[in-house]
Amino acid sequence: MKLKLSEPGYVVSGGVHLLALLMLIVTFTKPEQFDPMQETVPIETISDSDFNKVMQGDKSASAVRPEALPKVDKVDPSPEATPTPPTPDAQKTVPTPPPPPAPEPVTQEQPPTPPTPPPPPVAETQPTPPAPTPPTPPSRPAPAPAPVVPTPPERVDADAEPVQAKPLPPEPPRPPERVAEAKPTPPVKPHPTPKPPKVVPKPDQLAKLLDQEPADQPAEKPVPKAPTKMARTPAPPTAAQTDEQSHTFDLTDISRLLSHDAPAQKAATGREQSKLASLGSATAHADRMAPSLWGQLDGLMEEQYRQCWSYLGLSPGQKYVPQIRVTYDESGGLASDPVLVNPPSDPTLRNLAESALRAVRRCNPLRIPSQYAPYYDEWKGRVLRFDPQEMAG
Amino acid sequence: MNPADAAGAVTEVSIMSMFWNAHLVVKIVMIGLLSSSVWCWAIIINKTMLFAKTRKAMDRFEQVFWSGQSLEELYQTSSQKPTIGMASCFVAAMREWKRSFQNVGASFMGLHARLEKVLDVSIAREVEKLESGLLVLATVASTAPFVGLFGTVWGIMSSFRSIAASKNTSLAVIAPGLAEALFATAIGLFAAIPALVFFNNLQGMVARFQARMESFADEFSSILSRQIDQHVGGERDRAA
């Protein structure tokens, strides 16, 4: 089409379009970016009981195993055939290890053994120490006090020693035995580290050991313990000997100075060795309190409170059962002040409520057996009902 | 276009890249729509100017026509220059009138009918001149959205084919393809909307012009027929 001055439409339109395109290109170069959206975080709620069932895993474990395994240091020589659970998906309970031992009993346990025996057994025991330290006697004629021990003849004694020591080899079971004996009562663990032993001794083994215990204990305990100890560790027992040893300290002999006792913490045994506890498991949870345990605990508490409660009788028409919310700490003491849940509207009943509160306070350190310690989370908070009729009956 | 290639430069979706990355069909659609938009606007501008000029000319002509100036004189001045609107009707009618009177023996029988025809024809011609190009606007207004939609559908189709080929459905990969496909619809609407608006507007103006010219033609033909009757009566008188 011819461009005419009278019809400038094409030129004008083309120009305007070009302009519009240019503007578009300029303005559209940088598209506006959306604000980065916050990612939604899925939230899972866990209930209190779920939380209590959580097991502590090993942080250094790398993977979650399908089934939770306790830490096992060495293979149990007599593994027990455990029936496989009928349903693999069902949640298994894994026994809770006993709580870490309280530190005080340890200090009580350990020192007594060395100091107590000395006076009588000195005579008996004195032959032993030289055995480990033969080079010393010649160098020194008489170490200062040495009331009982003439050094030279010890050679002979040392020779005799093996004879005496011979019965020992059969005895090695003893140290572990001792440990095993001590085991049922968790506090005995001499190891102060908070790490709880991973394997609870099996009941039948315990029973065996307990049978042996009465036989061994009365006669042998003071004596054999000392010899074994001394045969292996020349260091501690009598004042005289310690004195002597202090003079004969020898670096080359340091291995003798080190404890040859079997480590107090026994290796945890199990069917197969695993250095790491599982990081966790989808198919297992921590142990829960059995109903029978609940029943026992209820009975225990009822009995103790019954003794503490001096209640006042109610007049026949009245019906009121004071309920008291109690929080215990792990030893059974009150963790917080008991709270009356249902204060009576009738002032005459206040006496009853007060008496119940008094009873709770009087029974303050409640005696709760240590077997309940692992389930502390389950019984720490309770509501006690003080029913006058039940108590009367 | 391959979304996987575009994924690297997703953030850069300018108009130019949208155009160059588009499929050939989409490109053609875009270019066609853009040129049709240019055409439409050219027509709109031209028509608007033409209509303004026509209205002015009509107003002036009517003023002169009803001012009592002699028709002969008016014809002399009007026929010298190109005329538009009523003036051309007037000139055409006058020319026919004059032609009928130039040869002496011409009969007046049917002169009125001829004048009517001439006026009609000239009006039709004028209206056609005014209306020319408006059809383009109508066509663009009605088809541009569809053409743009076609481009979009084609672009989306090819971009989905690319998704299927690259097996990547990330939105960042799909987005450029969809954007450039939708660009075609945007251009289509950009062309169609003003075309439709101005088509209706200009069409209405043309109708008004036509009505004005027809009323003028009626008046003029009545004037002429009066003249004819006078002429015939005069001749009859002379003859009688």
Image (cartoon, coloured by chain):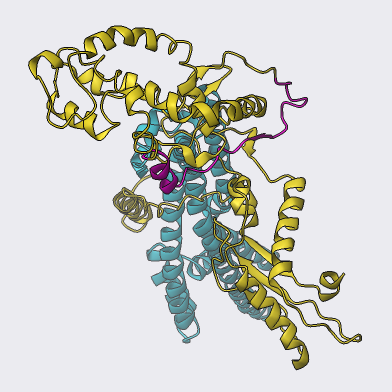
Q: Residue B50: give x, y in percent of width and height.
A: 43, 63
Is residue B146 part of the magenta span, yes or no?
A: no
Chain in yellow on the image? A
Q: Residue at x 73, y 32 (%)?
A: A90
Residue B130 at what x, y percent from top left? 51, 60
Instruction: State which quadrant residue B213 falls in.
Output: bottom right
Q: Is residue B24 above or below residue A31?
A: above
- Residue A64 in sight from this viewpoint: no
User: In what quadrant of the picture does the N terminus of chain A appear?
Assistant: top left
Please tell me which residue is depicted at 48% across the width and 53% down the height of the picture.
B190
Q: Is residue A110 left or right of residue A184?
A: left
In front of the other: A221 or B26? A221
> Could you tell me what secondary structure mostly forms the magenta stretch?
loop
Figure quadrant of the C terminus of chain A:
bottom right
- Work out which residue is located at the far right of the displayed protein and give it: A317
In the rendered image of this protein, does residue A282 appear above or below residue A300?
A: above
Q: Position of residue A284 (x, y in %)?
A: 64, 34
What shade does chain B have? cyan
Visible in this render: residue B21? yes
Q: Which residues are magenta?
A: A82-111
- When the figure is inspected, residue A203 is found, relative to residue A29, above or below; the finding is above
Side of B48 relative to A138 (left or right): right
Give B86 or A335, whichever is nearer the viewer: A335
